[in-house]
Image (spheres, rainbow, N blue to C red):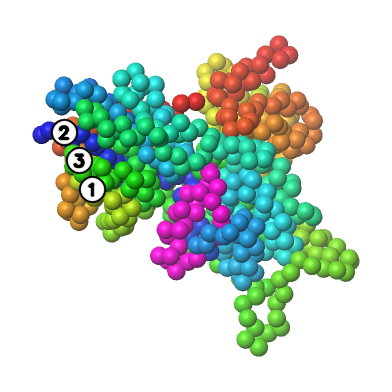
């Protein structure tokens, strides 16, 4: 019998978190990510872990802070409005250089919005996770398998760089069922000499805090943090290039929008249009280099996203305005159809003829 | 064998209950002449857990087949509340109607059934089908599946009467995927002392498997309405 199982994206990432050695989950229910909590509520007690439904998202993120400070792998999940509530805690985690994994299964906004999928938290995830100067590693899965694989990756990166890593999924990724294979071996063990685990009178006590009242001291912490961010930008960029060898038009899309775009690309190729795609897997760090390289070859970029145009700003910066970047989008819980993407491709192909 | 008037479908969430419920109702309607005394078929959506994959997704097809759809007006909408349909009492009132009841996943979904269980038990003309999928992670082995079964029975107040083996791996399902699950299904049946009523497979696999598996039930998969 196959080792594959049929899982929802939300379940797959929850199981992957367990496989990555995470034994602590704190959260508050919100559609479309509630299966993460439901799954872990069943699993955690059986493996000596902690599942706790907190009284609010804010409480949950501060519980995450506590476990992270104690040096253990910890997870919280929510959907768009719930992530907004967590943003104070995300900033505190950053200020205290604590590793944690945060899941955002996005829904349409702003406000309470709706429960259908969206990608309109791109700015929030990549630029404005909370107050102050900080970054989060942002990973964007486009299949149930990647929901799981990137969750394991997120735990490793968070520990390695002492920062939060976010899975930026959407309602489709959370709800869809696909066969997955979950084989990760032993979780990576990363030493955490800074963790507050009790000195047993054998060492100086560790302090985990984000309050630094001496400005030049606080400045040094910010400088050091951004040195680490530079390493991440150099070493951890992930993306997929699809049919880019001879491409004259380049689609940039992530998550479910990238899957839709692949269908549109196959259709366009049948019509003889040379189109490819760069799919960012890390949204931060953003894959700037392959896009700049593509800018010398292609005549136009099409950014396909389920927002009013958020990632498109990063694409424009990445290609340094060498080539036009147009937007193909749906919002409010709507998903672009392959036909809509195809129409954008056809339109781009006709320009300059 | 005379078909029971009410068919209830429950199981772990994601096991495929809704797809089977829709296909089963369509089959009952097609074969209504084999169930003397009944003049219509209805399908009721009792899911209070899942706002996405609902019987209502097949509303057009059900309507075209002349099957009454009993579901909350909020089902499949963006109104994410656990509402129950108000006209569900039609099922116990109209004894000339056959009914398929699609119950939400796990024990939480089955809680809604508890409200209607006394009337169903009193009439005692029902089948309570357990839908299983060997490839779902929380019901992969006998012990964990039996745990889910007991939780659903306790929450819903009705005991299962037989099993539907709906083992599949989504789009990657092959005939072998289904054949490999037969042993699992048999061991569940053995552990809980229930017969296997049928094995459901998507219709493309029906021809390949119909001589190899008893009581094979072909499924036309629901399409999500945009």
Query: Which chain's residue wears label 1?
Result: B
Give the total number of marks visible in the rendering: 3
Classed neighbour count for the residue bearing mark 2: other residues with Cα under 10 Å, few (<14), some (14–19), many (≥20): some
- State the mark number for residue B160: 1
Asked if labels 3 and 2 share a chain, the reply is yes
In the structure shown, which secondary structural element does the residue marked by tag 1 occupy?
A: loop
Classed neighbour count for the residue bearing mark 1: other residues with Cα under 10 Å, few (<14), some (14–19), many (≥20): many
Classed neighbour count for the residue bearing mark 3: other residues with Cα under 10 Å, few (<14), some (14–19), many (≥20): few
Q: Nearer the viewer, residue A229 or A294?
A: A229
Residue sitting at 39 percent across and 40 percent down?
A: B47
User: Which residue bears the numbered disc 3?
Assistant: B123
In the structure shown, which secondary structural element does the residue marked by tag 3 occupy?
A: helix
Q: Based on the displayed image, in which of its 4 quarters is residue A260 positioned?
A: top right
The reply to whether callout 1 and callout 2 are in contact (CB within 8 Å) is: no
Q: Nearer the viewer, residue B123 or A107?
A: B123
Residue at the extreme top: A353
Q: Report the quarter where the N terminus of chain B lies.
A: top left
Which of disc 2 and disc 3 is earlier in sequence? 2
User: Which residue bears the numbered disc 2?
Assistant: B3
A319 in magenta: no
Residue at the extreme left: B1
In the structure shown, which secondary structural element does the residue marked by tag 2 occupy?
A: loop
Q: Is residue A344 above or below residue B115?
A: above
Write down the region rendered in magenta: A25-50
Query: Which chain's residue wears label 2?
Result: B
- Image x and y of residue A351, in percent: 71, 15
């Amino acid at each position: 019998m196959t080792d594959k199982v049929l899982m929802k994206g939300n379940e797959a990432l929850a199981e992957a978190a367990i496989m990555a050695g995470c034994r602590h989950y704190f959260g508050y229910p919100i559609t479309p990510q509630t299966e993460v909590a439901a799954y872990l509520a069943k699993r955690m007690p059986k493996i000596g872990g902690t599942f706790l439904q907190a009284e609010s998202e804010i409480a949950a993120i501060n519980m995450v802070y506590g476990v992270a400070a104690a040096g253990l792998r910890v997870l919280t999940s929510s959907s768009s409005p719930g992530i907004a509530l967590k943003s104070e805690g995300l900033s505190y985690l950053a200020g205290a250089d604590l590793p944690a994994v945060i899941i955002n299964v996005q829904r349409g906004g702003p406000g309470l919005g709706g429960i259908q999928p969206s990608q309109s938290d791109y700015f929030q995830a990549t630029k404005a996770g909370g107050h102050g100067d900080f970054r989060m590693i942002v990973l964007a899965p486009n299949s149930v398998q990647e929901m799981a694989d990137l969750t394991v990756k997120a735990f490793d990166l968070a520990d390695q760089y002492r920062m939060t890593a976010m899975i930026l999924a959407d309602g489709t990724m959370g709800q869809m069922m696909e066969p997955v294979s979950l084989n990760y071996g032993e979780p990576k063990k990363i030493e955490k000499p800074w963790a507050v685990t009790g000195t047993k009178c054998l060492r100086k006590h560790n302090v985990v805090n984000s309050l630094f009242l001496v400005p030049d001291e606080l400045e040094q912490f910010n400088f050091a943090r951004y040195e680490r961010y530079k390493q991440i930008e150099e070493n951890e960029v992930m993306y997929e290039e699809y049919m880019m060898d001879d491409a004259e038009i380049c689609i940039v899309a992530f998550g479910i929008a990238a899957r839709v775009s692949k269908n549109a690309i196959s259709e366009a190729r049948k019509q003889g249009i040379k189109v490819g795609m760069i799919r960012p897997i890390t949204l931060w760090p953003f894959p700037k280099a392959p896009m700049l390289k593509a800018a010398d070859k292609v005549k136009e970029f099409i950014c396909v996203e389920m927002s009013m145009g958020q990632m498109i700003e990063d694409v424009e910066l990445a290609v340094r305005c060498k080539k036009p970047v147009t937007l193909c989008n749906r919002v409010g819980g709507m998903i672009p159809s392959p036909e809509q993407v195809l129409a954008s491709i056809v339109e781009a192909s006709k320009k300059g003829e | 064998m005379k078909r029971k008037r009410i068919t209830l479908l429950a199981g772990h969430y994601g096991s495929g209950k809704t797809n089977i419920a829709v296909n089963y109702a369509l089959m009952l309607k097609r074969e209504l002449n084999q169930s003397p005394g009944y003049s219509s078929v209805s399908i009721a959506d009792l899911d209070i857990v899942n706002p996405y994959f609902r019987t209502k997704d097949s509303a057009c097809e059900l309507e075209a087949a002349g099957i009454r759809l009993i579901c909350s007006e909020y089902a499949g909408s963006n109104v994410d509340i656990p509402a129950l349909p108000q006209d569900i009492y039609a099922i116990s009132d109209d004894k000339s109607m056959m009914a398929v009841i699609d119950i939400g996943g796990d024990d939480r979904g089955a809680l809604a059934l508890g409200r209607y269980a006394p009337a169903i038990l009193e009439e005692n003309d029902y089948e309570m089908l357990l839908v299983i999928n060997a490839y779902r992670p929380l019901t992969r082995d006998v012990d964990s599946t039996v745990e889910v079964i007991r939780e659903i029975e306790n929450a819903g107040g009705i005991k299962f009467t037989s099993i539907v083996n709906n083992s599949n791996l989504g789009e990657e399902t092959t005939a072998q995927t289904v054949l490999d699950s037969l042993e699992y299904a048999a061991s569940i049946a053995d552990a809980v002392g229930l017969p296997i009523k049928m094995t459901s497979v998507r219709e493309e696999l029906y021809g390949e498997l119909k001589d190899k598996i008893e009581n094979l039930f072909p499924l036309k998969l629901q399409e999500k309405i945009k």
